[in-house]
Image (cartoon, helix red, strand yellow):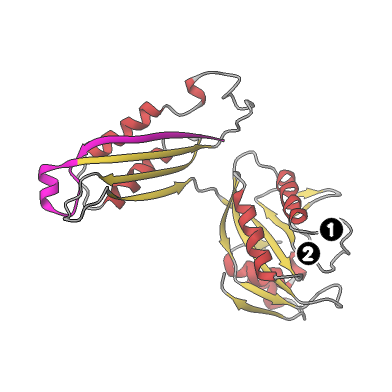
């Protein structure tokens, strides 16, 4: 991924709560960082095609900043920075994330100070279409879940949008083990990111957190991550089945999934309907908000 940086751009503007600031104006300092959703190895054109069309022209971004600054009088730098960030984010489909910091170089205050300002970061929202189930019953169970969610969200093609409360669940298949902490997360994924790519990434998280290859099926584990649903995709393979075939038999999936996506339907039934009509016996208790 590449980052476009616009550093210490100085523009004169008429922003501020004090009326005098809107009349006399003052200089503002703009710093902008733009993260592009492109690989850095040349596969998407940066290194193999030395062409401005394969990136974002910083001169055009500066024109966006100048237009918003010159044609508005904002009370708050927060509003100014927010409007600039959102406009830049919509400028190109290559843009993944934008940071905008706006500072008053000579603020109207008596104290000796370098500057005051506001900063905002906005990122492209991906469509919520993937649900994953996470569980842990070894070590610090909550820490394991939080660490896994953080690692999932770090992937450039995955945005974690919703996380359920934490539920404590008695073991379902192998009874002679400690209880699990379980959650369900909802995420958006970037265009072209496949379920098999996601599976590979999730497995790398499991093993990096200490899960062993010879783990007993349904037995104790530091972390377990299952893909429940991936948009309208249906897969039946030796490695992956989507939608997950055991959604309706797992109360520790149904309860948190119903919490974050009550309208989600599996086999044409809502989670609430499945829960109501099921005869699932395992104990599942909500213990903590995320």
Q: Residue at x 86, y 73 (%)?
A: 174
**In the drawing, what numbered circle is on residue 246?**
2
Does the segment drawn in magenta span residue 64?
no
Q: Residue 140: where, in percent of width, then height?
A: 70, 70
- The one nearer the camera, 3 or 218, is 3
Residue span colored magenta: 1-26
Compute the Cα span from label 1 to label 2: 23 Å
- Against 265, is 128 above or below? above
Residue 29 visible here: yes
Q: In which quarter of the image is residue 251?
A: bottom right
Q: Residue 146: where, in percent of width, then height?
A: 63, 63
For label 2, the SS is loop
- Against 200, is 93 above or below? above
Residue marked by disc 1 = 212
Q: Residue at x 60, y 27 (%)?
A: 44
* Among numbered discs 1 and 2, the one appearing first in the sequence: 1
Q: Residue at x 69, y 76 (%)?
A: 168
Q: Quadrant of the N terminus?
A: top right
How many discs mark residues in the rendered view? Answer: 2
Residue 129 visible here: no
């Amino acid at each position: 991924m590449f980052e476009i940086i616009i550093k210490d751009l100085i523009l004169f503007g008429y922003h501020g709560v004090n009326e005098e600031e809107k009349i006399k104006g003052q200089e503002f300092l703009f710093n902008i960082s733009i993260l592009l959703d492109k690989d850095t190895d040349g596969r998407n054109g940066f290194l193999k095609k030395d062409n401005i069309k394969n990136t974002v022209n910083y001169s055009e971004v500066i024109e966006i900043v100048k237009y918003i600054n010159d044609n508005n009088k904002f009370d708050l730098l927060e509003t100014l920075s927010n409007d600039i960030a959102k406009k830049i984010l919509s400028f190109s489909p290559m843009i993944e994330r934008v940071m905008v910091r706006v500072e008053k170089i000579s603020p109207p205050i008596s104290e000796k100070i370098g500057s005051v300002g506001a900063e905002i970061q906005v990122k492209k929202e991906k469509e919520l279409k993937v649900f994953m189930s996470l569980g842990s019953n070894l070590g610090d169970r909550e820490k394991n879940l939080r660490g896994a969610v953080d690692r999932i969200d770090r992937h450039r093609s995955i945005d974690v949008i919703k996380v359920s409360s934490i539920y404590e669940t008695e073991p379902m298949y192998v009874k002679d083990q400690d209880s699990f902490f379980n959650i369900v997360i909802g995420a958006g994924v970037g265009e072209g990111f496949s379920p098999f790519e996601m599976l590979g990434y999730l497995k790398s998280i499991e093993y990096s957190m200490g899960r062993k290859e010879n783990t007993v099926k349904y037995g104790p584990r530091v972390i377990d991550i299952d893909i429940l649903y991936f948009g309208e995709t249906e897969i039946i393979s030796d490695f992956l089945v989507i939608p997950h075939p055991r959604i309706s038999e797992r109360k520790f999936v149904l309860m948190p999934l119903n919490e974050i996506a009550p309208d989600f339907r599996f086999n044409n039934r809502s989670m609430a309907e499945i829960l109501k009509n099921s005869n699932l016996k395992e104990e599942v208790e909500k213990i903590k908000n995320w």
